[in-house]
Amino acid sequence: MDSYILWTVVILALGFDFINGFHDTANAIATSVSTRALKPRVAILMAAVMNFLGAIMFTGVAKTIGSGVANPADLPNGVEVVIAALISAIIWNLVTWWFGIPSSSSHALIGSLAGAVIAGSGIGTINASGFTDIVKALILSPLIAFSAGFIIMWLLKRIFAKSSPHQVNKGFRFSQIVTAAFQSFSHGTNDAQKAMGIITFALVAAGVQDSLDVPLWVKLSAALAMALGTSVGGYKIIKTMGTKIFKIEPINGFAADVGSAVVILTATVLHLPVSTTHVITSSILGVGSAKRFSSVKWSMAGRILVAWVITIPITVLMAMAVYWAMDLLFI
């Protein structure tokens, strides 16, 4: 295989990771920026550093991505499949970022990879059990995050019920610096591994290596790409997450950050890829519901939910179309 085709995969995967950095990491710092616990530029730079540290410490999710949807060793056209999947996922991420919609980069990548595999090798090459496990994790994690956010906020309301709201928020504004860092670290442990997994998938498909162990250069380049993307920032999504769901105060941001970060890090330890966007948004919704159900702008939550539901089917179809177009033009 020509080396330039494999390098095309690497460049596209790192491009996806870069976009993921400013697309999804905005979610991780949205609460701390909206409550003015951190200035936007400081929050973004801190998130970039913590994303990098989180990304280089784990590889379990990368191995799940590398084998969960399909076995790359069984695909004679696996590298072309990955190229089509990455193009589709990148297009969807840019479209949703442009409109400030916090859709899932994880859903986009998984849906695109499945669509490209189906177009390139047929539906029979999909690893049904692995794909089902990934989808289960993507579905259940937001529900768990909603519950975690609700419970943490419910407990905090009772603990500080007799305290001065001004003093409580002053204290939690400082605490948000810590939780925003924790949130960004957990984001790096899960999301950066998706690019690592897709590059490793291509390396196995191309016969460059015969295992799903992630090479050191892949870990470092994916971590760096996400950190650089994070440094660019995603202000449109910060605005949606931090102000348009409900008015977040420091105590609310603290609860949302802790709830979502714990869910994401737990999923990473279990080698499960989850949507950090879904998890963080669901945690914010849970916190808002515990604060006061009517304070949540459910119309905005509905728009976000629609984006969640349509992302996988749309990216499946997009990736199939991209693969077929590549087949006509190049393959």
Image (cartoon, grey):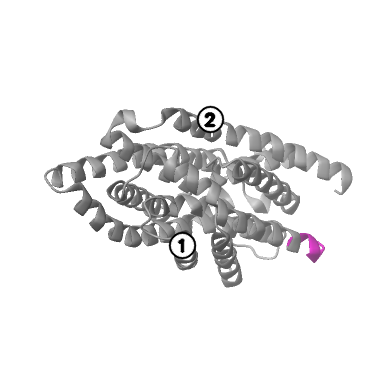
Residue that protrudes farthest toward the front in the picture:
166
Nearer to me, 291 or 331: 291
- Label annotation for residue 38: none
Give the labeled residue for mark 2: 306
Pointer 2 local density, CA inside 10 Å: few below 14, some 14–19, many at least 20: few
- The amino acid type of the residue labelled 2 equals Val
Mark 1, secondary structure of its residue: helix
First in residue order: circle 2 vs circle 1: 1
Residue that sits furthest to the right in the current view: 329
Q: Is residue 288 above or below residue 22?
A: above
In the image, what residue type sits under mark 1? Ala
Quarter occupied by the N terminus: bottom right
Q: Residue at x 43, y 54 (%)?
A: 29
Q: Which residues are magenta?
A: 1-6
Would residue 317 be seen by someone viewing this image from the given angle?
yes
Q: Position of residue 265 (x, y in %)?
A: 38, 55
Image: 64 above or below 200: above
| Relative horizontal placement of residue 6, taking residue 147 as reference (left or right) | right
The answer to whether residue 271 of the structure is visible from this angle is no
The residue closer to the viewer here, 70 or 277, is 277
Q: Position of residue 83 (x, y in %)?
A: 73, 51
In this picture, residue 314 sits left or right of residue 275: right
The chief SS type of the magenta part is: helix
Q: CA distance from mark 2 to mark 1?
A: 28 Å
Q: Which mark is residue 47?
A: 1
The percent position of residue 286, horizontal first and vertical second, equals 33, 37
Residue in the image at 40% along x and 41% along y: 141
| Vertical placement of residue 136 versus 83, above or below | above
Q: Residue at x 27, y 49 (%)?
A: 251
